[in-house]
Image (tube, rainbow, N blue to C red):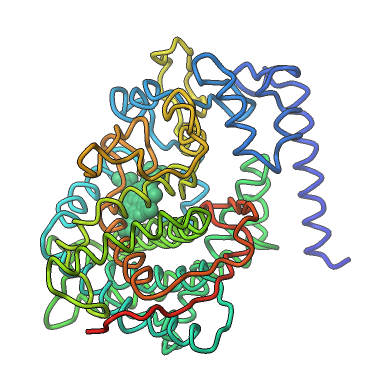
Amino acid sequence: MDPPSLLSLALLLLAAAAAAAFVLFPRRRSPEKKPSSGNPGSLSELIKNGHRILDWMVEILAASPTNTVATYMGVVTANPANVEHMLKTKFENYPKGDRFVTLLEDFLGRGIFNSDGDHWKLQRKTASLEFNTKTIRTFVMENVRVSVVDRLIPIFARAAASGETIDLQETLERFAFDNVCKVSFNEDTGRLSGDDTMEGREFARAFEQASELIVGRYKHPFLLSWKLMRFFNIGDERRLKEKIATVHRFATSVIRRRKSAASLGDDLLSRFIAEADYPDEFLRDIIISFVLAGRDTTSATLTWFFWLASTRPEVLARVEAEVNAVRRKNGTCAGVMFTLEEVREMDFLHAALSEALRLYPPVPLQTRACHESDEFPDGTKVRPGTTVMYNSYAMGRMKSIWGEDYAEFRPERWLDKGGGFQPRSPFRFPVFHAGPRMCLGKEMAYIQMKAVAASVVERFEVVVMDKEKVREKDYTMILRVKGGLPVRLKEKSVAAG
Ligand code: HEM
């Protein structure tokens, strides 16, 4: 065994010993009283159900009269009143907390996604102004047009002509990555077209690998174990360091180029540069946060949507009818990108995507740290330092929130009597988070997802292989379809523009 492996082994043993001590003497190590065995949230139950953590949480939360359970990992809730309390009423008392921030800090620095307090407030203020301008909406729509009409649709048309099977999830991930990079800092990473530069390709790969490796840190029972590996620069921590360096190098070179450019563009980085003389590192952290936030979220949602819709063909027929009605009304033909107004008119499609998000939220579990002693509206006492979580996945599957048919994929539940989209309280449907930290990219995400779904449904029949098979979940950072979604495409005969 070589020295790094020996060291890894020693660290593992150290971590195991520390874990044993933690289990044997929990009260001396933590102010929280952990649930004892027999309790639904105990460590033994957690270990038993670790491979199906989300579905296990649905069961224990549904069985609790207040839909809240103290688990070995902290307090978990699926109760809308508690969610509103955490995310809005007592917002200041529930920051992300040091544990979360420390885990991601090497990669994200103190970007908007990974900061609390004044540092977060400053970024949020500027970013929310920029996310809400007409300029950014037009810029987003133009980028979606280029990537859908000039790239995604031709790839699908080639696959339809050759009859090959493609992985829909993987294709949409490449699409989403290009798109979020364009909106964030106006660089074409060329993941979908394949005409990426060496620098862009390296960045994309390093970003993907760094995201995966950093999630690995959550699996360490103690901060100490991955920190020691980082200190000795071994194993995954060494690889992570290299990948982060590549991501940072690329981001910094983009920032320097943009700062010295004769004119600025409409992307988010340019808007920040135009606003004030922020240091490179501050800007780097922000754009990396944007890419992380917008990367796999929309592609995962679209993939789940196409699988769910394949099990109910009448949903796809209704989406197609809606798209055709919008075309007729505006006198446009297939092949021409929809305008922002047209996309907004598609209420049924909006409902169908929201229904996919309800059943498979890309960010299924959110954690916060309790700052000062508190009590939730349902009476749950929360001590300082306790990890508190709300579970969007479970909330999408609560009979108390959605009624008897909660398990069914039924977009109609989102429509009012006139067929208009009926939004729900974000505290009952916190898929985009809620309160002052609500997702900034929600509108952008819907625009992108609706433009893709409408363009694909209008032109192709998406034949999902083995559609009756219930898809397994791959839950690391984002809730994706395990193994991807193999599909075949069949071109419909539509009048092209
Ligand atoms: C279906 C798509 C999406 C979903 C479900 C989603 C969900 C979420 C959630 C749950 C959070 C809270 C995370 C936390 O506090 O830990 C969040 C934050 C955020 N999202 Fe999204 N997101 C989506 C797409 C996007 C896109 C396309 C962007 C654009 C770049 C974006 C930008 C952001 C930003 C900047 C934040 C941080 C807000 C803050 O902390 O103040 N999101 N999103």
Q: Is residue 34 above or below residue 328?
A: above
For this view, does 349 lie left or right of residue 7?
left
Residue 149 image-quadrant placement: bottom left
Q: Does residue 286 appear anywhere in the picture? A: no
For this view, does 438 lie left or right of residue 296?
left
Residues 238 and 351: in front is 351
Q: Position of residue 408 (x, y in %)?
A: 50, 40
Q: Is residue 220 above or below residue 428?
A: below
Residues 195 and 94: in front is 195
Q: Does residue 255 appear anywhere in the picture? A: yes
Residues 171 and 254: in front is 171
For this view, does 174 lie left or right of residue 92?
right
Q: What is the total number of numbered labels drawn onto the structure image?
A: 0
Residue 258 image-quadrant placement: bottom left
Q: Is residue 468 above or below residue 159?
A: above
Q: Residue at x 48, y 13 (%)?
A: 380
Q: Is residue 13 above or below residue 395?
A: below
Q: Residue at x 38, y 63 (%)?
A: 291
Residue 23 image-quadrant placement: top right
For this view, does 147 lie left or right of residue 385?
left
Q: Quadrant of the C terminus?
A: bottom left
Residues 350 and 196: in front is 350
Q: Position of residue 481 (x, y in %)?
A: 57, 57
Question: Which residue is the extreme one toward the right?
Answer: 1
Q: Quadrant of the N terminus?
A: bottom right
